[in-house]
Amino acid sequence: MPVRSDACSMGEMLAVLLARDMADGEKAIVGTNSDIQVAACNLARQRQAPHLWWVSGPGGMTNATEGIVRPAADAENIAVAEAVMDLPQMIDFIDWQVHFFDFAILGALQTDRFGNINTVCIGDHARPKLRGPGTVGISALCGLSRRFYIMMTRHDRGAFVPKVDFICGAGHLDGGTSRTDRGLPEGGPRLVVTPLGVFDFEPEGKAMRVKSLHEGVTIEEVRDNTGFDLIVPAAIERTVSPDDEELFILRRAVDTTGVLARKFPWPKAN
């Protein structure tokens, strides 16, 4: 997997791609290990969505904005947040008010062709090969928020599997109308952003589809690194790379200490 861009890091690219899809006045919730997600929300607030409202799911901090990117649960965000809820209040808020959120941004150990996500374990639940951080509020967020985004910092067959080993976040379940057939509201995953491209979901069957590929990425490379058949349109778009304005604002107002570049560089060539 070669380096994609000299102009920006992978973390900066993913943050910009997420930020572009956010609208003014929307309400968002992000998870624990969420540097890129936090940067995306604050970049959108600096550009096209000044009234975007985001909250840390585990920490309860709202609109923590200082120009320094930290994981959403970091206690240092308290001093620069507009408001803070303690953990019991936050859990109640997620459980009972999740329909309040326009979207969530979530990472995962695995995702599958219908956008179900797994943060619990790899392998059998009783004897896992790898145990993840668990479900926490992900089930409610994926099931009841109006939409969610899947942000993956790796794109390979271990992360993109035909069927996740444990569904902790319901995407489009088995495809088609299976999500609403089982009592969940319309919604589900909107976009998947990865080091290789941006993916959405075909409206009828709800299977994952190529939306755009990053510069230098081929469809053969994506197929080789995906454990299921993607829907491929007749004409494949190229992802629009971050422009000078986006990177200027990101680096001068959102991520002034370069966390995204340090923590999330492009994967090295094989």
Image (cartoon, rainbow, N blue to C red):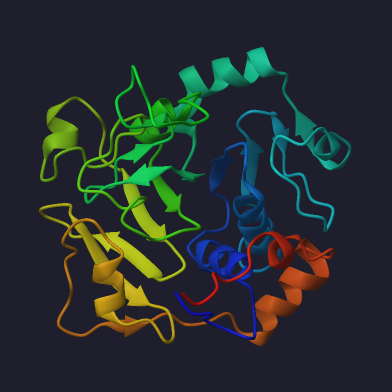
Viewer-side residue, 6 vs 151: 6
Horizontally, residue 256 falls left or right of residue 192, namely right
Up-down: is 270 above or below 205? below
Up-down: is 8 above or below 216? above
The image quadrant of residue 226 is: bottom left
Viewer-side residue, 6 vs 56: 6
Residue 58 position within the rendered picture, expressed as x and y whole percent measured from the top left: 64, 28
Residue 209 position within the rendered picture, expressed as x and y whole percent measured from the top left: 23, 64
Horizontally, residue 234 falls left or right of residue 136, namely left
Horizontally, residue 199 falls left or right of residue 235, namely right
The image quadrant of residue 259 is: bottom right
Q: Look at the image and tell me in which quarter the N terminus lies.
A: bottom left
How many numbered marks does the figure carry? 0
Residue 130 position within the rendered picture, expressed as x and y whole percent measured from the top left: 44, 33
Up-down: is 37 above or below 94? below
Viewer-side residue, 55 vs 150: 150
Residue shown at 24%/69% (left/top)? 223
Residue 11 position within the rendered picture, expressed as x and y whole percent measured from the top left: 61, 64
Residue shown at 40%/30% (left/top)? 121
Q: Residue furthest right?
A: 79
Residue shown at 38%/41% (left/top)? 146
Up-down: is 216 above or below 122? below
Residue shown at 41%/46% (left/top)? 148
The image quadrant of residue 199 is: bottom left
